[in-house]
Amino acid sequence: MRALIVDDSSFIREYLRHLLHRMGVVCKEAVDGSDALSVLAAEQDFDLMLLDVNMPVMNGLECVKALRAARLGPEMKVMMVTTEADHSFIATALDNGADEFLMKPFTPESLREKMLLLGFIAA
């Protein structure tokens, strides 16, 4: 399994990479939505994107909209990683192609639960 971690924080990218690696996931990283779209234009064999919402250049909502509109990685699941808890934002993100949300701050257990929900790991 392969995942693309998109976050402007190197600490969050490293932490997610460490947690996912322990689950057997191979990871690649991008620093913002625009960078992620460039990675996906070159490599479309990702199973999952973990996408921060608040980033410079291109935020997570703009990225997921562009990703789905361009049909890059059409089978790839998108997990928004965010502090945004507003129900209207969550509804908008889901309407635009997000599959799941991981709320910051998150724990290894909460990430594992989301991976289980998406069918990437067994119980």
Image (spheres, rainbow, N blue to C red):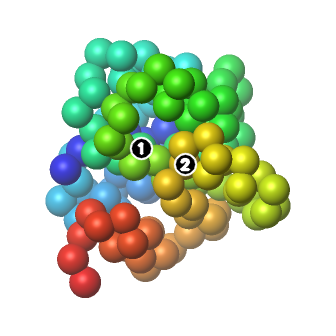
Q: Residues within 10 Å of mark 2 (few under 14, many from 20)?
A: many
Q: Residues within 10 Å of mark 1 (few under 14, many from 20)?
A: many
Q: Is 61 located above or below residue 16 in the figure? A: above
- For this view, does 114 lie left or right of residue 121? right
Q: Residue at x 37, y 21 (%)?
A: 39
Q: Residue at x 36, y 16 (%)?
A: 41
Q: Determine which quarter of the picture holds residue 109.
A: bottom left
Q: Position of residue 27 (x, y in %)?
A: 29, 43
Q: Determine which quarter of the picture holds residue 29.
A: top left
> Outermost residue, bottom direction?
123
- For this view, does 4 lie left or right of residue 43? right
* Amino acid at dot 2: Ala
Observer able to see residue 55: yes
Instruction: Using the numbered discs, state the Cα–Cα distance from disc 2 to disc 1 in whole angstroms.
Output: 10 Å
Q: Report if the CB atoms under discs 2 and 1 are less than 8 Å apart.
A: no
- For this view, does 39 lie left or right of residue 99? left
The number of discs equals 2
Q: Residue at x 43, y 56 (%)?
A: 15
On the image, numbered disc 1 is attached to which residue?
49
* Amino acid at dot 1: Met
Tag 1's secondary structure?
strand
Q: Position of residue 71 (x, y in %)?
A: 42, 26
Observer able to see residue 32: no
55 or 73: which is nearer to us?
A: 73
15 or 75: which is nearer to us?
A: 75
Q: Position of residue 14 (x, y in %)?
A: 42, 48
On the image, numbered disc 2 is attached to which residue?
98
Quadrant into which the C terminus falls: bottom left
Q: Position of residue 120 (x, y in %)?
A: 27, 63
- For this view, does 65 lie left or right of residue 4? right
Q: Determine which quarter of the picture holds residue 40.
A: top left
Q: Residue at x 29, y 15 (%)?
A: 42
